[in-house]
Image (spheres, rainbow, N blue to C red):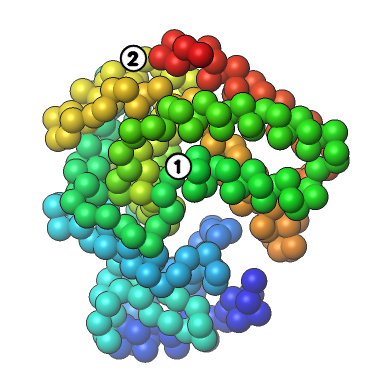
Amino acid sequence: MSTSFDNLTPDRILDAVEFGMDTSFTGLTAPLPSYINRVYELQSVAGERLIAKFYRPGRWAREALQDEHDFVLDCAAEEIPVVAPLELAGGGTIGECDGIHYSVFPKKSGREMDLHTDEGWRRLGSLIGRIHLAGSRREAGNRLRMHPETTTIPEIGQLLAGGFMSPHQADRFKGVTSRIVEIALREFEGIELQRIHGDCHRANILERPDEGLMVIDFDDMVMGPPVQDIWLLLPDHANSARREINLILEGYEQFLEFDDQSLRLVEIMRAMRIIYFLAWCSTQIDDFKFQSNFPEWGGEMFWQREIADLEHQYHAILNDERLKV
């Protein structure tokens, strides 16, 4: 990580945003919870509350950030409730401070939505359908393509090459991930990829009083299968959440046709997400905040538990009634 990112001071933050917005701010620089990026609440002298996000160097190129902003702005243009980046004084939505990219957003808050009724699930499906309709209108050429060939296989290679596991655990890990990838490659054949949120879990969908649902945090947007933004919302494995799936799709298909065959990917993508997170963690092990947040990462008991989870997930894939092997 760059030294400048570690040493973002309130003065540097305010100077950058005042220049980018061509607006004077008070001294408020309240940090908000975010491990990946640095996020702060600011206040203009006119009293407007804004959120400044400084992006972790090396994670996304400027072009990839632009793809994210384009997607959010496309959603906003179709009146989908999102938090769109503000245009800066020099044009565009991405500024730069000592090599660190940043953007500014209006402050909007809400509460976690209520998902205890059938109508709640339908509303959720309608929102995802609208987002995917906007996402289908163009591609994001600088973003990851969520496919086992381009994400999962390299991530497995990264973990095995890094020497993070004992030889015994590495053999177990290689065995179970090879079996998962074999199925994933087959089942991804013919699946169309498009712009999706990518990290569409419940914490990223808020309810705003008198306004309805709002989607936040497009930071992990990808070109991927639309089903990715559905399975993350489910309360259980696919075979135990059929009612919720059907309700989501009732709302979704008011706006966009859904490929029912892609539901066979749900448990595969759950395994892919486990592998993705392990690989991401392996790139953070030298970061002090990571070490304090994940003190057990990389130990023998850690890998026993994680590989057991992957083996359990492999059996969930085999037991999926939509996926007979």
Q: Residues within 10 Å of mark 1 (few under 14, many from 20)?
A: many
At 50% from the left and 40% from the top, the residue drawn is: 148
Mark carried by residue 243: 2
The residue positioned 59% from the left and 24% from the top of the image is 313
- Amino acid type at mark 1: His
Which of these two is toward me, 30 or 15? 15
Q: Quadrant of residue 127?
A: top left
**What's the distance in space between the residues labelled 1 and 2, CA to CA?**
27 Å
Which residue sits at x=72%, y=26%? 308
Q: Position of residue 38 (x, y in %)?
A: 53, 67
Image location (x, y in percent) of residue 80: 19, 49
For residue 25, say whether it is visible. Answer: no
Q: Label 2 near label 1: C-beta < 8 Å? A: no
The residue singled out by tag 1 in the image is: 147
Residue 170 found in image quarter: top right
Q: Is residue 26 above or below residue 113?
A: below
Q: Amino acid at mark 2?
A: Arg
